[in-house]
Amino acid sequence: MSTPICDIMRRAVLVAACLALAACDAAGLQGLGRGVKPAPSQIAVTTDRIVVTGPTGFCVDPTTVRDTADTGFVLLGNCAAIANSRSAGQPTTPAVLTATISEPSTGGRISDTIAELDSLFRSDEGRRLLSRSGEPSSIVILETIRSPRVFLLHASDQGAGAMQDVQPDYWRAYLDVGPRLVTLSVLSTKDRSLSREESLSLLRRFVQAVQGAN
């Protein structure tokens, strides 16, 4: 399988996996520490200055930001925990959010190929791309939802190399922002499972926040 959309997704998923694992010890997943810390509500990454922001109560954890100019990764968590200040605010739905920004694409856009993504991710190659261990058998595709501009995926990764402090299942959105593919994820924390409705609502609000900021 070597279609343009497959090549785009391959690059985007690999970038997401590498950058997420590099930031898996995120301070925002931990409890309150010492001293008030920066907790910005948004950040711009890559040379295209793609703005990443989340729903109310979520802030950027500066210690997890990876910005190589070509690609970017941002983790957002509880503002109060990141800032070490209860007055900073907290989200109504506790979760960890991540955003990955791909290299600029010249080979097609997600919005032009939404119909192909379900079969791609259910294939061995697609599940291998999603798997942190590289084993397609570790990935279970639980649900997909298509809209004209955004593809939503609910999956579970039971393989090795999982991010710390989060559960193996996650919701993810793929969308175009300018010339780049942006991947947005919602992950439940170890101590608080989110229902389908909670995760899906939060992911859609995350998508709206990023689209509105760009």
Image (cartoon, rainbow, N blue to C red):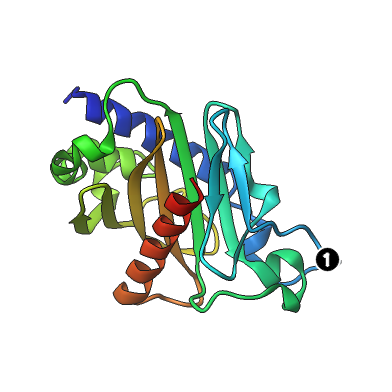
The answer to whether residue 33 is above or below residue 121 is below
Residue name at image x 34 percent, y 38 percent: 134
Q: Nearer the viewer, residue 156 or 6?
A: 6
Residue 51 in picture, x, y percent from top left:
55, 45
Q: Is residue 121 left or right of residue 134?
A: left
Q: Nearer the viewer, residue 57 or 158?
A: 57
Residue 188 in picture, x, y percent from top left:
45, 68
Residue name at image x 41 percent, y 42 percent: 182
Q: Residue furthest right?
A: 35
Residue name at image x 61 percent, y 53 percent: 42
Q: How many marks?
A: 1
Residue 73 in picture, x, y percent from top left:
54, 42
| The N terminus lies in quadrant | top left
Residue 90 visible in the shown view: yes
Q: Secondary structure at mark 1?
A: loop
Return the residue at label 1. Answer: 36
Q: Is residue 162 left or right of residue 165?
A: left
Residue name at image x 71 percent, y 72 percent: 88
Residue 17 in picture, x, y percent from top left:
45, 41
Hey, which quadrant is residue 68 in on the image? Answer: top right
Q: Amino acid at mark 1?
A: Val
Q: Nearer the viewer, residue 212 or 83?
A: 212
